[in-house]
Amino acid sequence: MNEDMRNMFLAIGVSLLLVFAVQTFLPQIFPSLGPEPEPQVTPAQAGDESGEGSAGGLTVTGTDGESVAAIVTRGAALDGNERVTIDTGVLTGSLNLTGAVFDDLTLTGYRQSVDPTSPFVDLLHPQNSRGGYNVAHNWMTSVGGALIDPKAQWTVVAGNELTPDTPLTLETTTATGIRVERRIEVVDDYLFRLTDRLDHNGTQGVTLAPIGTVNRYDEVIDDRYTTTGYISVLERKLREHKYGKIAKPSTNPEERLNPTSGETGGIVSTGGWV
């Protein structure tokens, strides 16, 4: 055996010895570097990976910081509230009468894969189901609060389903005694028109502004490529506000997008959008 071959085998032997020493003795010297024990999962926590079973106590926090109950199956979530059927010809689903929110819409012209038998694409999902996503309309008061409780129960005044030929009329009464009547119409395949009538019998005037929100309740796992928060252009300046900063009181007036009564600061702008 020549010297080159002997040196090669010697190097291989030293390398194997070094690997063995590292794997054997390093975890004893630095216990934190050892393999982490696998978490113990109980059957209740395991749930169903497909989303058809219970999520085992998993809670979801929405974009508004509100904590939602444990995730349930889509069917269970739909059964948990009184609803009115929606069928526009290209959209099917239901309107949730708790909050009068759109949280159950399916695109009947699109499937989840090229397989013609695959399920249709679900566009909106109930808040406490996997992938919770909804659309809501409300009114904001001059002090920054919502006029209508998001959990308010709406009553059907006219109509028993929402279709292009049959509009729907709902009503509810706010905590301040304002009666809100809402008429919902299908004006195009994918377009809904909401018309609100507000009856106020109080002695003091109320200043209101309409607001529409699209709310997501699933936790964003990887946000490296997206901005998770409010984006606004106010006073000709792009502003990106993280949800965490919005949820917590701030000493910086620039971070108060909507100061409550008695607070100073906020962003005053003519025009722009949020």
Image (tube, rainbow, N blue to C red):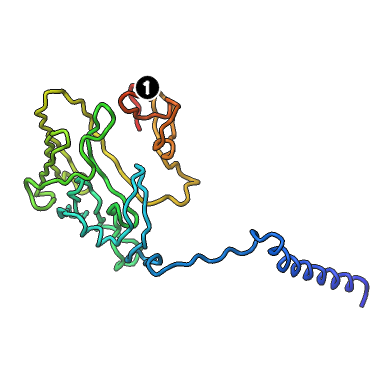
Q: Is residue 5 above or below residue 222?
A: below
Residue 93 located left or right of residue 1: left
Residue that mark 1 sits on: 264
**Helix, strand or loop under label 1:** loop
Q: How many marks?
A: 1
Return the residue nearer the eye: 267 or 12: 267
Return the residue nearer the eye: 127 or 188: 127
Quarter of the image for residue 53 reads bottom left
* Residue under the image location 24 percent in, 53 percent down: 105
User: Which residue appears farthest toward the bottom when viewing the image?
Assistant: 1
The amino acid marked with disc number 1 is Thr
Return the residue nearer the eye: 106 or 51: 51
Which x, y percent locates residue 112?
33, 61
User: Which residue appears farthest toward the left when viewing the image?
Assistant: 158
For the C terminus, the image quarter is: top left
Quarter of the image for residue 108 reads bottom left
* Residue under the image location 7 percent in, 45 percent down: 157
Which x, y percent locates residue 240?
44, 34
